[in-house]
Amino acid sequence: MTGATLREVLPDAEALARRGAEFVLQTCQQASGDLRVCLAGGTTPKRMYELLATPEFAPRMPWARVHWFWGDERFVPQEDPSNNYRNTRIAMFGPAAVPVTHIHPVRTVGTTPDQAATEYERLLQSAYGSATLDPARPLFDVVLLGFGDDGHCASLFPGTAVLSERRRWAAAVVGVKPEPRITLTYPTLESARHLVVLGAGAGKHEVLQRIQRGDDLPIAHVRPVGTLHWFLDRAAAEGA
């Protein structure tokens, strides 16, 4: 693992989504054996997923070797428009006919947020083959993260207790947003060969400036065991 940080600035949001899709495709093509990819919600990743399901990308993607997980999920039914799994299914899994057995959403019905977090943690540990993360053997081949205008990533929000969680792999976040969230913790997200942060639009510009100033924002503290990639469009990166 290199621990390197790389930064790319793309002309616009469409070019950013295309670069992200190309990166995921190339990383999966170059890896041997089964892979684990951790997905993000949001507008920019959604366009990436749509591209991966197009005839340009889909035939080259080793779908049968890739297992898909999520960095966070809203604790709402899977058919709710805000559900990350639902939106990824519509954008990519359905059009690309991804094997259902390779899709691992967070359970959000018939359980509690805490139980859902524990269940997802156990699912990840089973996929990894251990209850202890080894920096030399990352859990994920690729982790995709967006970030909010407040600097949050996944559902790691400023000022929340989960930011200091180092033992749990997943945790419930309750009371910050109208609906509870299930989020992977820093150690889990950071167990990645490649962690890609996606930022598009002028709304992200201030967050990037705050990171440069050294402000205490959740996204600023992400330190993967592998390579950290920042993929930004020009509107987000201008002057930052």
Image (tube, rainbow, N blue to C red):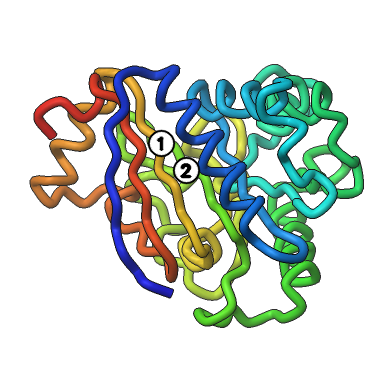
Q: Which residue is mark 2?
A: 145
| Up/down of 86 relative to 183, above or below | above
Residue occupying the point 57% across, 71% down: 138
Residue 174, horizontal then vertical, whole percent: 56, 44
Q: Amino acid at mark 2?
A: Leu
Q: Which residue is mark 1?
A: 198
Residue 92, horizontal then vertical, whole percent: 73, 27
Q: Amino acid at mark 1?
A: Leu
The C terminus lies in quadrant: top left
Residue occupying the point 61% across, 38% down: 180
| Up/down of 169 relative to 106, above or below | below
| Up/down of 83 relative to 13, above or below | below
Which sits earlier in the primary sequence, circle 1 or circle 2? 2
Horizontally, is 98 left or right of 20 in the view? right
Residue 222, picture quadrant = bottom left
Residue occupying the point 58% across, 48% down: 71
Residue occupying the point 64% across, 39% down: 73
User: Dot 2 lies on which element?
Assistant: strand
